[in-house]
Image (tube, rainbow, N blue to C red):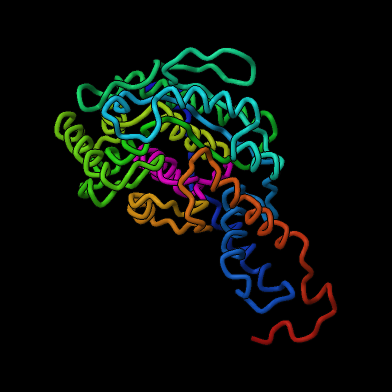
């Protein structure tokens, strides 16, 4: 285990439940029937406990998009060729992707990190942190070595630290990598023991007839790699992706600094499973933004006992769904800080239920 990862794990503690009790009491003094703002009230308590502040501030947000390629793309599991990963990174840099639009809308700092794109990328606007040029084809070889997996986790930890130094108070984590739903499905199957065919979806939009091929590829990879279900790093390194490892590191780094993280869709949630296996207390810092169309996402959410904020039939990735959920967190904190109490508003009957 790297020194960066060891240091980060040692700093992660659970949420501040005492602050949560204070906030819960304060919420019941606001000019509304107790509990009438539903999940928004629970979200306010959660954010207060994460930040350790009765009136948490989660602005501005930071968005991290990790990009990497997958050797399993050679098996024809995606609707797009591998070179699209690099082309989409260029699109991020040129402000042309959905995550650029949504990040701008919420006033987020956006950083694009090359942790494992197969081709060499040049130009400004990219953080160059390539561990290796794509993973191995998991049907034929391990995705990466254990050392490479830890290097990629370290890339994510350092990226979250940069966001904190830049003044960000909430993190959105996204990804780009052709064939990464295949790798994520393999990781999920290995961690949960569930049947592959109940986990896979259309990913980038493959035809229904090709789903059986995708399932067969994953089943071959699982049989060949023999990853140990009780060793998250083993599963990650044999079956996963460099961007999945980096996302896991970003969650760990954020949790070590008491920074809330909005988890995006299927791939992001599988990365969250890895992070939580490495350190269960990380779960306290994760807020799940939306429910993806990918069938495996429901399984991953259930495994983490997570209930996402939105369900918009999304399956894009990039952190897009998490960015769309961010305004709900802002509403929760603004309600907590700015809403009048019965006493301050001079309204009688605040005790009436």
The picture places residue 299, in percent across and down from the top left corner, at 33, 53
Q: Is residue 342 left or right of residue 258?
A: right
Q: How many marks?
A: 0
State the image coordinates of residue 329 (x, y, percent, origin top left).
63, 54
Q: Residue 132, percent across and down? A: 39, 15
Whether residue 302 sits left or right of residue 46 in the image: it is left
State the extent of the magenta-drawn residues as a range: 258-287
Q: Quadrant of the N terminus?
A: top left
Image location of residue 143, percent across then percent down: 29, 24
Residue 281 sits inside the magenta stretch: yes
For residue 20: magenta?
no
Residue at the spot x=36%, y=39% of the render? 181
Foreground: 274 or 256?
274
4 shown above or below 261: above
User: In percent of the image, x 68 and y 51: which residue is there?
Assistant: 56
Residue 346's place in the image compared with 295, above or below, is below
**Of residues 139 and 237, which is closer to you in this image?**
139
Pick the front one: 231 or 297 = 297
Can you say which quadrant of the picture contains the C terminus? bottom right
Q: Is residue 268 placed above or below 341 in the rendered structure?
A: above
């Amino acid at each position: 285990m790297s020194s960066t990862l060891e240091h980060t794990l040692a700093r992660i503690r659970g949420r501040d439940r005492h602050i949560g009790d204070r906030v819960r009491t304060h919420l019941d003094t606001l000019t509304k029937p107790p509990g009438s703002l539903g999940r928004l009230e629970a979200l306010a308590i959660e954010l207060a406990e994460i930040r350790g502040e009765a009136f948490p501030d989660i602005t501005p947000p930071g968005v991290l998009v990790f990009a990497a390629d997958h050797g399993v793309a050679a098996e024809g599991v995606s609707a797009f060729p591998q070179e699209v990963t690099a082309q989409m990174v260029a699109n991020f840099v040129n402000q042309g992707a959905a995550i650029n639009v949504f990040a701008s809308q919420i006033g987020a700092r956006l950083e694009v990190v090359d942790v494992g794109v197969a081709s060499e990328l040049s130009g400004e606007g990219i953080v160059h942190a390539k561990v290796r040029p794509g993973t191995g084809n998991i049907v034929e070889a391990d995705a990466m070595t254990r050392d490479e997996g830890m290097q990629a986790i370290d890339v994510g930890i350092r990226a979250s630290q940069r966001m904190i130094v830049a003044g960000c108070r909430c993190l959105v984590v996204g990804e780009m990598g052709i064939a990464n739903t295949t790798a994520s499905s393999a990781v999920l199957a290995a961690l949960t023991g569930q049947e592959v065919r109940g986990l896979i979806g259309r990913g980038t939009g493959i035809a229904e007839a090709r789903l059986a091929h995708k399932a067969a590829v994953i089943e071959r990879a699982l049989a060949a790699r023999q990853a140990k279900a009780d060793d998250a790093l083993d599963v990650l390194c044999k079956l996963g992706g460099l961007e999945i490892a980096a996302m896991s590191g970003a969650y760990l780094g954020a949790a070590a600094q008491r920074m809330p993280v909005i988890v995006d869709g299927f791939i992001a949630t599988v990365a969250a499973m890895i992070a939580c296996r490495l350190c269960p207390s990380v779960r306290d810092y994760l807020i799940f933004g939306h429910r993806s169309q990918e069938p495996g996402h429901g399984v991953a959410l259930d495994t983490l006992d997570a209930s996402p904020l939105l369900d918009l039939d999304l399956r894009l990735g990039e952190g897009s769904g998490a960015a769309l959920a961010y305004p709900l967190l802002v509403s929760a904190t603004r309600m907590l800080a700015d809403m009048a109490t019965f006493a301050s508003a001079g309204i009688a009957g605040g005790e009436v239920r």
